[in-house]
Amino acid sequence: MKMVKRVGLGAVCSAPLHLMKPSKVIKTKYPNTLGRPRIEQLLALRKEVRSLNNKPQVCIVFRHDDFPNEELYCHQRFCRVEQEGPLDNVFGEVDEVEGVDDEHPTVEVPGEVSGSVARSEDAALLRNEGFDVDDDNEPAPENIPVTGEILNDQQTWGWSGRCPRKFSGDSYDPPKLIGMTNSESKSMTIFSMFLWFFPVDYLHEVLLGELNKSLAEEKARTICLGEFLRFLGIWFYMASFKGLTRRQFWSTQDIDPFSGAPIRFHEWMSRHRFDIILKCLKFTNHPPPRRTKTSSMVFANSSMLGTATCSRGSALRGFRVLMSQCLLGLHDGHALIELVEGKDAPRERLIPTNSVAGKTVGLLLRMLSSMNGRGMLVVLDSGFCVLQGLVELRKLGIFASAVIKKRRFWPKHVPGDMMDQHMSAKQVGDVDSLKGHLDGVPYDLFCMKDTDYTMKLMSTYGSLVPSPKAPDKFRNVDGEVRKFQYTEPFENHYLYRHAVDDHNNLRHSDISLEETWVTHQWENRVFAFILAITEVNVYLAMRFFVWRCGDKPPMTFLEFRRQLAKALIYNEHMTHQDEDDDSSPRRSKRGKKTQHEKESAPSHARSYDGSNWIFGAKDAYQRYTCKSPGCKKLVRTYCSCSVEYWMCDACYVVHRIAVATDENVE
């Protein structure tokens, strides 16, 4: 068998030149790294944690003759040992995080990564550039074996005889909305359920306040909660159709059953009002950062993501939670959304808390922080099968299980091959447990013999006793039918393993809300994501708590979206003033052929607030700058379709031509 050379003090190594750090120092000697050359004769000095791409990463530090008095380093993954050093000086695992150097620049994502090629090719390209890529086929970082590490697990076969969760007094509670009785949950309407799940406090405290500031700068009237909910309802209604542009819903042409939008929104909101609200959306009241560009993109959503956890609506007590790579958790008072660095997300952000515990373990601790001390169960995807993570959750009062899957290596502390050999002689349906302790916390590696394989789970709860509620399972083994029942950990796994996938399938349905909201602003896309999450949550909650108790069959997701849009458009928070504003003379002109007329402002007019003229100009015929892009003419005329905007004669002609062209297209 080929022996793997180990890196240690004095080892001679090589590494890709374009991945060596600090890049400024490398470029002084090698300005051209095309062709991905390797740098040879690197002398290994030590192994330590340094910052790579704004993340703490385990690196190997080198010296090289071409760079006297300089220390070079790269990620340990890219270090190739050409010649081992003394065996006594082999590097072990880094025990603690040392000082992180933040002076080195961030590597930019390659321009070739655009999503136009296969995801596997994108992942390979990013890895070559030194980026970490989440991949279901790659092991979790904590499960990658460390050279020279000796594990003393002291594991023994056989179940301990008691379930830790039941022994601690925790039991299963049926799902319910926290703070509500069953009768109250059954009486919830679509609108009340939406407000229950959506962070309404954030709307009042942040979004509406910042939106009204922006509207004031545009000299537009302010907005209240009812009108903003109507704005969202119009978005949901537009998302019920595919292949239509936004302007088609405000077309002045007669409705054609074979062309264009099947409805017009003039009755609910003018197109100008809708566009000005969309333009003025602001999602944070935090002060802007010192940097601009990508860092400002993060802060643009800081209030929204910080307060999304305040919504009572995600309080689904008793729901077992399955976590997948979508990084969404719904449980007990919190809607936890984790931003993961990707091709479409900004790269500059603070290192998350719990990162010292490891990437996967830290992610679990952050995502499930609201469940601490509750004795709840969590069913985890195989991407989270890190035993240390389950142990850390158990210390915080959370019981969990994760399916064991081999990804190049068996997970740490899991002797997978030995477990397969142990179960090879068992009958289909037989179960066993390899028990052990980690950091003083007991755990079980459950095995179940199936027809062609051995199913394995790591768990901090459960037993080998068949679950009394589990249905009978049947397998055909050599012409003989074998009947058995799942034990509790396996039953929970098969029941809830697709929970998040089903949630994502609804969110990414054929007509996706996020896809219909066509925008290049990253903060708008995050807001659309939260809206889509809320929509699916409301649909599933209505289906579970309300519709299954009635006589009518449940709605399809598309039918539900239109009913949600109707509830938001005609919401109870709309005031009479809002209705009057939306039924202003501008709307009555929509149906007339003379809707685009050039008019002059009345004497002493200063501005228009959306419903009335504001007077106070010293000159009776005061003129103002035309608001068309690039035009500086002083005028007092406007088009009747947009009273708020001053428009000169030349720009009015261009405006009429553009409107006529749009109407012909529509």
Image: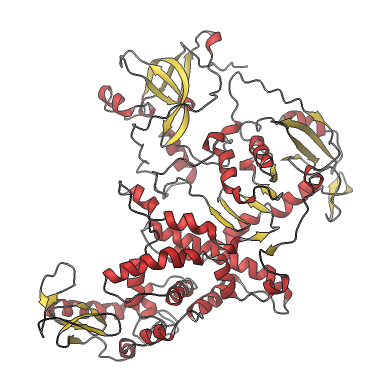
Q: Looking at the figure, which quarter contains the N terminus? A: top right
At a point 30% along the width and 46% down the height, the residue shown is 291
Quadrant of the image for the C terminus?
A: bottom left
**Colouring of the image:** secondary structure
Vertical placement of residue 280 versus 265, above or below = above
Q: In this image, 399 relative to 621: left or right?
A: right
Find residue 584 and report its horizontal and vertical position in percent: 33, 87
Q: Percent from the top left, x then y, of residue 646?
A: 18, 77
User: What's the residue at 78%, 38% (across, down)?
Assistant: 447
Q: Can residue 360 be seen in this view?
A: yes
Quadrant housing residue 663 = bottom left
Using residue 207 as the reference point, say whether residue 160 is left or right of it.
right
Of residues 302 and 532, the one drawn nearer to the viewer in this rendering: 302
How far across and down, in percent of the image, does residue 616 sit? Answer: 17, 82
Q: In this view, does 287 lie above or below 28?
A: below
Residue 654, image x, y percentages: 18, 76
Q: Which of 62 and 355 is in front in this view?
A: 355
The extreme right residue here reads 480
- Say whether residue 255 is visible: no
Q: Residue at x 31, y 49 (%)?
A: 293
In screen coordinates, is 23 left or right of 658?
Answer: right
